[in-house]
Image: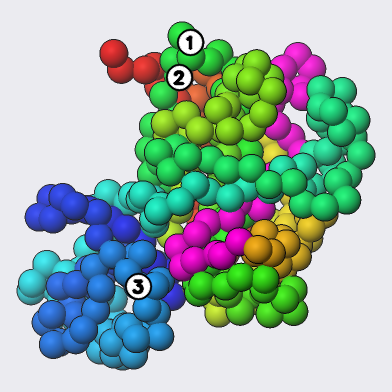
Amino acid sequence: MRFVSFSSSQIPRAHLGILRNDEVLDVDLAGRALGLDVPDQVLTLIEDYDRYLPALQTLMEKVQSRSFREVKTFSEIGAAHTLNEVRLAAPIPRPRKNIYCLAVNYKAHAEETASQRDHKGQTPNIPVFFTKSPTSVNDPYGEIELDPQVSSELDWEVELGVIIGKRGKNIPEVEALSYVFGYTVLNDVTARDLQKRHKQFFKGKSLDGSCPMGPCIVTADEIADPHNLNLSLRINGETKQDGNTKMMIFNIKHAISVLSQGMTLEPGDILATGTPSGVGFTRVPPEFLQEGDVMESEVEGIGVLRNLVVAVKR
């Protein structure tokens, strides 16, 4: 299934929906119509998925091959929406923890950053982790604010995001994918000048709104091979990044296993798995986001983020 957090004119608070084609089904309203025990938040769903899955399957059995709007039980109570009638939030609008991220996890990205990083283009021997603040999370179609008093070097990094589905510590690599709830698209927007000035990742990668995510979470059972997905990024229609998750240095299984050593991972934790080559600051001359730019981040089989860069509102 594909899960979203969305709001509507009737219910302005972001809540759980099922995405199919160009429609969203309000899980809470639809569940109440059928007398089912269902959650209304994505995090609640992830934390107790086995409990709620039968009810979700009942909802989809009610729909069968029809559109959500063709199901009178749902359309009459306002549970069925077209995508253009709602606003999508990030699937997990406010994570409970920082977002875990992998640095230099694509060989070509390590090579392109060689002249500006201490690693000198050498691929790491172990995964390199950093985090982004929960307040960096942005909607899949949210605006990216450009504030020259804070940073004039905002850069892009399209990534596959992994959503943890169950609690685990010291997870064996062979079992790691069984801990994955699903996958999403994520853009690790980075203030390169802050990253350089502070000599570490966190500050430059944690500006408000610097982590667009979504447009949905696709459950793991619907992604045949997360290690063979095309991912790309476009600025104003021009392709800047074009890679495949098979190019990762450390695959998802290994990253989860290493991250969990001595540290408990919990349902709803998010892991960004690194970016391919094509970022802006390594180009000649360097390229950074400008007011009016439209940035599109895409991962095969999941969807596209579309974010407009705007001047900061004071």
Residue appearing at x 37%, y 78% in the figure: 48
Q: Is-magenta flag for residue 281?
A: yes
Left or right of 57, for residue 38: left
Amino acid type of disc 3? Leu
Q: Main secondary structure of the magenta part?
A: loop
Above or below, 131 relative to 19: above
Residue 58 lies left or right of residue 225; in this view the side is left
Name the image quarter holding residue 257: bottom right
Q: Residue at x 67, y 71 (%)?
A: 170
Please tell me the numbered disc located at residue 46. none
- State the image coordinates of residue 5 (x, y, percent, origin top left): 32, 58
**In this image, 225 relative to 92: left or right?**
right
Element type at mark 3: helix
Q: Which mark is residue 148?
A: 1
Query: What range is drawn magenta here?
Result: 263-287
Please give the residue where the numbered disc 2 appears in the rendered image. Answer: 146
